[in-house]
């Protein structure tokens, strides 16, 4: 193990990229190849890492992390090492309760990296991304910049407090109506019209600020809290249904999409939703239900019956995260979907990946044959936009268009968007050659 205390070596670097949560803790670099190890370490030093430890032996690195998982802010590791491959490394980090960020590096093709990344996500590790060797400094910096953005409203104490939240805290929060929706617009690829908004749960915590679902959904899953949470976010005072009623009264013609775990589709769910729509005077076609998970333990026929009833009553049904383990081909054949939502893991960065492009093309083709509309989620850049438009996707959602926003910001955003959209010639959005950035920012 080599330790490099580099705080003095980078005095002339004016704008370090690394987030404070990562930088204030130890950075660990693991690679059995000495040259590669030093190169990565140097790049991290230039990015702002204050204390770096280098390991050629992954077992030594794991021993150090397990002594105090919280002391480490970032692990950057090769996934092809004779003593511990990427799969074992990720499983070990999860087992010892590592809470910091992770970057995986490989000299092999992107598919292997992407599988190990999926595994890390499945184990709830905070993976910033993957890099192929030789690592380009710009690629590393953009991953670390992503972490800085995520980190901008959080700090070390806050992330510890979030990790200590309990189901009882969430139950109290539901009683106090602290659960709210943020909304993200979904626009047509054809003409940029806003065709819908997706409601995304947030916890407006009195001391910790706005928390995203990753901080609290797991506290609700598997208990009656998920039921309370879902119906409060649908029909409660900050609910998606009152919001779409409010927008429709002001001329908005799109629908609202809500996320529903399939395990919630028990007998009575459809009635409860349909009654709520009547109570709020919202037409069923103004609601789209995104089905987010398939659990082996649920009664699939009960779920199917509830979804079929909703569909018969003209509620729109969407297959969320299509192409991932959560949304399968069997499901697409069984459930009466209207919409296929292409998972962001295939959309973000698709212009640079033959594999992602091939998957997107196949999914869009399948959706057309099944008469389903397609939505690309995770459109982050102009390149992502061009990619999904050229593949014939119907609509798109993502940071390139708008980040999820509070309900109060929606009307001003919709008004600004409409002015920009109309000020450009027709078919702008189907002609990727024109500069979409001019319309948006
Ligand atoms: P999802 O349904 O796949 O929602 C999309 C997620 O991607 C959202 O994360 C959204 O903020 C994020 N996102 C949007 N555009 C971009 C982009 O361009 N790039 C990237 N990297 N991400 C983007 P969020 O809000 O943290 O939600 C995470 C997940 O939590 C959702 O994934 C959904 O599965 C679940 N969720 C959210 N609200 C609810 C809810 O009320 N009930 C249930 N059961 N699940 C919910
Ligand atoms: Ca969704
Ligand atoms: Ca999704």
Image (cartoon, helix red, strand yellow):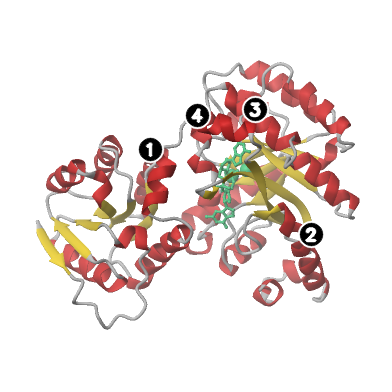
Q: Quadrant of the C terminus?
A: bottom right
The answer to whether 53 is drawn above or below residue 304 in the figure is below
- Numbered label attached to residue 123: 1
Instruction: Tell me the mark number nearer the camera, choosing from 4 and 2.
Output: 4
Q: Of label 1 and label 4, which has the lower sequence position? A: 1
- Numbered label attached to residue 228: 3
Instruction: Tell me the mark number nearer the camera, choosing from 1 and 4.
Output: 4
Identify the residue under disc 2. 411
In the picture, residue 59 is in which quadrant? Answer: top left
Instruction: Tell me the mark number nearer the camera, choosing from 3 and 1.
Output: 3
Residue 421 placement, left or right of 146: right
User: Residue at 80% across / 34% down in the picture?
Assistant: 315
- Determine whether the beta carbon of the residue marked 3 sits less than 8 angstroms from the nearest atom of ligand 1: no
Q: Of label 4 and label 2, which has the lower sequence position? A: 4
Q: Is residue 79 visible?
A: no
Depth check: 138 or 388 in front? 138
Circle 3 Cα neighbour tier, 10 Å, few/some/many (<14 / 14–19 / ≥20): some
Q: Regarding mark 3 in the picture, which secondary structure is present there?
A: helix
Identify the residue under disc 4. 167
Q: Quadrant of the N terminus?
A: bottom left
Q: Are marks 2 and 3 in contact (CB under 8 Å)?
A: no
Q: Of label 2 and label 3, which has the lower sequence position? A: 3
Depth check: 206 or 61 in front? 206
Residue 90, horizontal then vertical, whole percent: 29, 42
Q: Of label 3 and label 1, which has the lower sequence position? A: 1
Circle 1 Cα neighbour tier, 10 Å, few/some/many (<14 / 14–19 / ≥20): some
Residue 226, horizontal then vertical, whole percent: 59, 28
Circle 2 Cα neighbour tier, 10 Å, few/some/many (<14 / 14–19 / ≥20): some
Q: Regarding mark 2 in the picture, which secondary structure is present there?
A: helix
Measure how far apart labels 4 and 2 are at the Cα level.
34 Å
Measure how far apart labels 3 and 1 are at the Cα level.
26 Å
Residue 21, horizontal then vertical, whole percent: 35, 58
């Amino acid at each position: 193990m080599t330790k490099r205390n580099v705080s003095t070596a980078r005095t002339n670097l004016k704008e370090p990229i690394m987030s404070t949560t990562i930088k204030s803790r130890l950075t660990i670099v693991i690679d059995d190849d000495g040259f590669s190890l030093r190169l990565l370490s140097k790049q991290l030093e230039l990015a702002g890492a204050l204390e770096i430890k280098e390991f050629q032996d992954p077992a030594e690195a794991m021993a150090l992390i397990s002594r105090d998982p919280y002391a480490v802010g970032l692990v950057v590791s090769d996934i092809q090492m004779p003593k511990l491959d990427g799969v074992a490394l990720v499983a070990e980090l999860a087992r010892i309760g590592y809470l910091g960020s992770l970057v995986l590096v490989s000299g092999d093709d992107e598919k292997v990296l992407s599988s190990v990344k999926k595994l890390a996500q499945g184990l709830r590790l905070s993976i910033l991304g993957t890099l192929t060797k030789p690592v380009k400094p710009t690629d590393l910096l953009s991953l670390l910049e992503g972490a800085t953005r995520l980190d901008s409203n959080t700090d070390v104490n806050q992330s510890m407090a979030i990790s200590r939240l309990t189901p009882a805290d969430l139950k109290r929060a539901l009683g106090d109506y602290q659960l709210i929706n943020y909304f993200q617009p979904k626009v047509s690829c054809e003409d940029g019209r806003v065709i819908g908004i997706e409601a995304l749960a947030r916890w407006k915590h009195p001391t910790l600020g706005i928390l995203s679902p990753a901080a609290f959904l797991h506290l609700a899953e598997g208990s009656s809290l998920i039921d309370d949470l879902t119906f409060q976010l649908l029909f409660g005072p900050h609910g998606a249904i009152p919001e779409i009623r409010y927008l429709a009264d002001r001329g908005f013609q799109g629908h609202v999409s809500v996320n529903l775990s399939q395990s919630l589709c028990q007998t009575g769910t459809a009635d409860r939703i349909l009654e709520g729509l009547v109570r709020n005077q919202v037409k069923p076609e103004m609601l789209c239900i995104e089905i987010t998970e398939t659990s082996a333990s649920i009664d699939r026929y009960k779920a199917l019956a509830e979804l079929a009833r909703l569909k018969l009553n003209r509620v729109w049904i969407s297959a969320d995260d299509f192409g991932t383990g959560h949304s399968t081909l069997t499901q697409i054949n069984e459930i009466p979907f209207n919409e296929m939502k292409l998972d962001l893991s295939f959309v973000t960065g698709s212009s640079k990946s033959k594999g992602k492009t091939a998957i997107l093309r196949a999914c869009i083709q399948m959706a057309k044959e099944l008469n389903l509309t397609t939505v690309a989620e995770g459109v982050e850049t102009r390149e992502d936009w061009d990619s999904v438009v050229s593949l014939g996707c119907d609509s798109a959602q993502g940071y390139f268009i708008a980040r999820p926003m509070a309900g109060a910001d929606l009307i001003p955003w919709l008004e600004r968007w409409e002015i920009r959209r109309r000020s450009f010639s027709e078919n702008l959005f189907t002609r990727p050659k024109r500069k979409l950035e001019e319309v948006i920012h």
